[in-house]
Image (cartoon, rainbow, N blue to C red):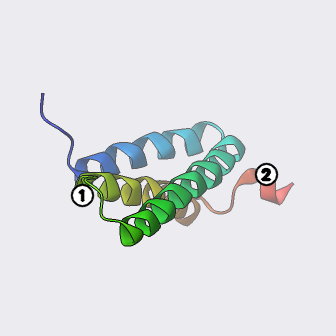
Amino acid sequence: MQKLRAGELLLVEIIVYILLWIVNDYLASMLSLILAGICLMVLLFSLAAELIEKSNVPRWFFSMLVVSVLAPLIAAALFIGFSGPPSWLLE
């Protein structure tokens, strides 16, 4: 079995997030913020640790974290761009 490349993972994650946005925009917005924030913090701590002391962490780890931070943001931007603001903001 081959590993997913960063571009393929980005597309898969965007599709999953967009489906979630279509089904329930409130849950999608909360999950997008939480998961993107967690991945961003892990990425920042990993990069800081890498600067302090070189480790043997593969490069794909950092690219997957960047993809996991960008995917929910891209999906939210696409959803808001095509269908307007989330319904829970309008109530």
Residue drawn 21% across and 42% down?
4
Name the quadrant of the C terminus.
Answer: bottom right
Residue drawn 79% across and 51% down?
88
User: Total marks drawn?
Assistant: 2
Determine whether label 1 and label 2 are within 8 Å by CB.
Answer: no
Residue drawn 81% across and 59% down?
90
Look at label 2 and name its amino acid.
Trp
Please, is residue 31 above or below residue 2 in the view? Answer: below
Q: Position of residue 49 (x, y in %)?
A: 43, 63
Residue drawn 43% across and 52% down?
68
Residue 75 showing in the rendered view: yes
Name the quadrant of the N terminus.
Answer: top left
Q: Is residue 85 left or right of residue 12?
A: right
In this view, the residue farthest toward the left is 2
* Residue under numbered circle 1: 59
**Mark 2 residue element:** helix
In front of the other: 31 or 18: 31
The numbered mark, 1 or 2, whose residue comes first in the sequence reads 1
* Residue under numbered circle 2: 88
Q: Position of residue 43 (x, y in %)?
A: 46, 60
